[in-house]
Image (cartoon, helix red, strand yellow):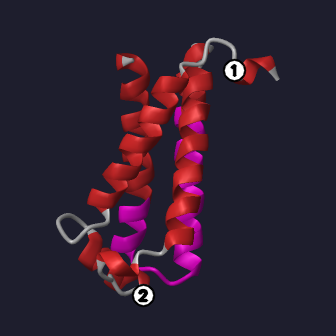
Amino acid sequence: MGELTTNVNFIAVIVGAILSFIAGWAWYSPMLFGTKWAEGSGVKLGTANDMPLAAMASQAIGLLLMSWFVGVTAAHEMLATVILATLGFAVLAYSGNTFSGKTAYARNVDAGYWIAALVVMIIVQGVL
């Protein structure tokens, strides 16, 4: 269990998760990819009052876990491992989104977000 905490920069883990969450807010907003993504995903973009709190909470927890994974691999000089894992998860999500009927655009937006979140987390690990 020590490998999950030894030399891990938990400030970078938390900051990486928060910044990735904010990046997701921008990524899926109408300012960037949100409108066309929503059409391709079969969802309707709502107002700030219509935020899906359960989805946002699970997204925040998932990003925290992913950022912790980045922190663990950074502490053990194994960042290639987290890059490989994230690419694998992005491809699996792409596959699942294909089965659920999302358009290619929506699938690419989703996969691109995971890669962008990973880049944010790695940068934060390097800076902090």
Residue for point 33% across, 59% down = 25
Can residue 48 be found in the magenta stretch? no
Question: Which element is circle 2 on?
Answer: loop
Quarter of the picture holding the N terminus = top right
Can residue 86 be found in the magenta stretch? yes
Residue topped by disc 1:
5
Can you say whether 9 is above or below 43 in the image? above
Q: Nearer the viewer, mark 2 or mark 1?
A: 1
Q: Quadrant of residue 37?
A: bottom left
Q: CA distance from mark 2 to mark 1?
A: 40 Å
Which class describes the residues within 10 Å of circle 2: few (<14), some (14-19), or many (20+)? Answer: few
Q: Position of residue 80 (x, y in %)?
A: 54, 26
Can you say whether 45 is above or below 105 in the image? below
Question: Which element is circle 1 on?
Answer: loop
Mark carried by residue 64: none
User: What segment carries the magenta color?
Assistant: 83-110
Q: Residue furthest front?
A: 49
Residue topped by disc 2:
42
Task: Report the amino acid beneath label 1.
Answer: Thr
Q: Position of residue 83 (x, y in %)?
A: 52, 34
